[in-house]
Amino acid sequence: MRLRPTIFLILPALFWLIAAAASAATFGSGPYVFSDELGGFRLKSVSGSGSTVDPIVLVEEFFGIGPAILTVRRVPSRLRVGPRGRENFPSFINVEKIVVNRSRRGWVGFDLELEEVRGEPSTHRDGLSFDQISQQTGRLASNRFAIGERTFDPGDRLLFFDGGVDPGDSVRFSLLITDTSPHGTFYLIQRPQFATSGIPGTSPSKRAAHAGEPKIGPLIPVAVKAGLGAPRSPAAWCVGAGRWPCSSH
């Protein structure tokens, strides 16, 4: 019996998926479990409960061009037990992200997108958003980017720009996620925006200085803009306002 040629294409893909699942990092924090199983980055640690005073802090490393996909699962057994039994899941998740740029290219922007179903844009009916209901602008902050733009329906996206992250350096974000979705799993798609001609002021000596562990600066509230219609292209973020050229690849 002869094996069809397609089996030689399927088997390597299956072996890769098994190996990726085995090497995936998974951390439980609050009533959620976070994983880098879909690839694009390395999840280093997770801490916190997700409350205002104790946000969930994600520490991540990016080595390539992305996208990086964070898988988030609700786990009923991780809920705290109160006087009336197990508590309900929180409707809001306060999140801080510390992302280290381990690639060889500088970042001039950072794009975050929520998905309830992988590969499909989020809508206002799914209960998942970047605080679409109240839109508290004070919850958005970063130590590297000055402007954040939110776009809702279709697609829930946060676009951070007007700043830069050198290779070997880190960026810190603070944001609020609304999670009233009936699904037990959602995804956070992360896409760094790369400079095509280098970040102004970045020199080889400066990049070498960032070769060790990056320093993490304080969070500063960003100026929030409401996106209208389809999100702007990466080129519009960087060139449209007189910034240096950039791309998402």
Image (cartoon, rainbow, N blue to C red):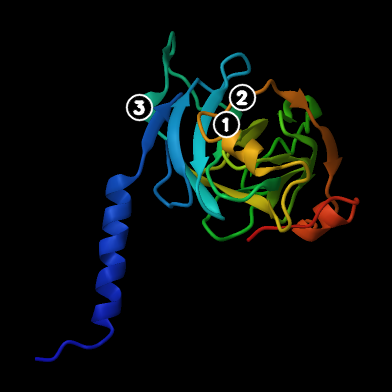
**Label 1 amino acid?**
Ile
Name the residue at 52% across, 50% down: 68
Q: Secondary structure at mark 1?
A: strand
Which badge, 3 or 2, is on the more N-terminal residue?
A: 3
Q: Secondary structure at mark 3?
A: helix
Task: Using the rendered image of the protein, determine whether residue 186 is visible from the camera's viewpoint.
Answer: yes
Quarter placement of the C terminus: bottom right
Q: Residue furthest front?
A: 205
Numbered badge on residue 98: 1
Counting from the top left corner in percent of width and height, residue 48 is at 50, 20
Numbered badge on residue 216: 2
Q: Secondary structure at mark 2?
A: loop
**Label 2 amino acid?**
Ile
Neighbour class for label 1 at 10 Å: few (<14), some, many (≥20)?
many
Numbered badge on residue 77: 3
Task: Using the rendered image of the protein, determine whether residue 184 is visible from the camera's viewpoint.
Answer: no
Counting from the top left corner in percent of width and height, residue 66 is at 55, 54
Marks 3 and 1: CB-CB under 8 Å?
Answer: no
Q: Residue furthest left?
A: 1
